[in-house]
Amino acid sequence: MTTTESVIDVRRAGDRAETRIAWLDSRHSFSFGSHYEPDNTHHGLLLVNNDDRVAPAAGFETHPHRDMEIVTWVLTGSLVHQDSTGHSGVIYPGLAQRMSAGRGILHSEKNDSWTLTGGQSHSEPVHFVQMWVMPDEAGRTPGYQQAEIEDELLRGGLVTIASGMTAHRDTTAIAIGNRHAALHGARLQAGQGVQLPDARYVHLFVPRGEVVLEGVGPLQEGDAVRFTASGGQRLTAGGPAEILVWEMHAGLVAA
């Protein structure tokens, strides 16, 4: 079935389901874990958009994934990744990271943001957004990729963080295993603006700051907008802000 009706669906931060335990505060844009809503399982190819804060010296112990492209974007602090294919790395603001679960992978994610100031050890929570999209094909070889894009982000325009689309082959920081999807990001100062992509499905998330979206109005930190058969709107920052935008030219059900 081809989607033709244009829809702009605003989802406010306070309406998200929340998982809160001793070391984790996680806000879920879609159904996740025990938080199941039959009418809120995905948008386009995006199944997970978790806004996570993990306490110091804590994190997700080794656990499995399968047939999923997982992109992690850190806002503050740092996150240590280790997986069963031998890959490891520290993810920090401005570093794009993708793990392809493929036919099966185990990994852990821990807050390792320890600093030393004036001879005293200090620590801080790590704040990150983790996003899952479906791959084109099941049973791929598991993989890992990361790339530094800090300089480009600081210029204020939309930067392609992760993409499987042919159009972004030479400009994306990291690749994902879906030829219909791309993740863009921007860091904006007050008055700076960007134009959203026009696609069958677009998902806008504001992980930090406040922006004003053409035709919608103000969006606060944690707000999201789901566009169907729409896009192209202008977005302007009301102050320092960061946005994450998924451009998707297909959905989970083939047209």
Image (cartoon, rainbow, N blue to C red):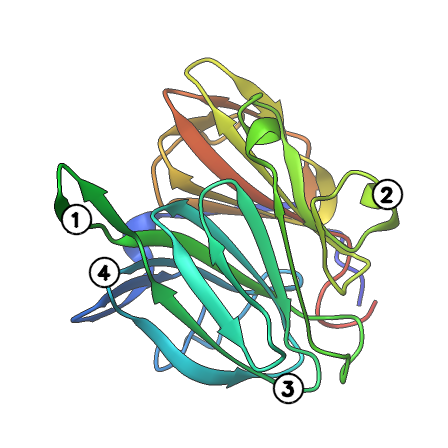
Percent position (x, y) of residue 26? 31, 63
Determine the residue positioned at 45% across, 46% down. Answer: 224
Task: Judge by depth and name the residue closer to the eye, 39 or 145.
Answer: 145
| Res. 91 visible in picture | yes
**Residue that sits furthest to the top in the current view:** 191
Crowding at dot 2, Cα within 10 Å, few <14 / some 14-19 / many 20+, comes out as: few
Q: Earlier in the sequence, mark 4 or mark 2?
A: 4
**Lower sequence index among marks 4 and 3:** 4
The spot of residue 45 in percent (x, y) is 66, 63
For label 4, count other residues whose C-alpha is less than 10 Å away and answer few (under 14), some (14-19) or many (20+).
many
Residue 56: which disc? 4
Q: Residues within 10 Å of mark 3 (few under 14, many from 20)?
A: some
Query: Label 4, label 2: how many angstroms apart (C-alpha)?
Result: 40 Å
Identify the residue under disc 1.
Answer: 122
Quadrant including the C terminus = bottom right
The residue that disc 3 covers is: 104
**Residue 247 has which mark?**
none
Res 29 seen here: no
Q: Is residue 247 left or right of residue 243?
A: right
| Three-letter code for the amino acid on which mark 4 is drawn | Pro
Please name which of the two marks, 4 or 3, marks the residue nearer to the observer. Answer: 4
The x and y percentages for residue 84 are: 57, 82
- Based on the displayed image, in which of its 4 quarters is residue 238 positioned? top left
Cα distance in 3D space between marks 2 and 1 = 44 Å
Q: Circle 2 is placed at which residue position?
A: 167
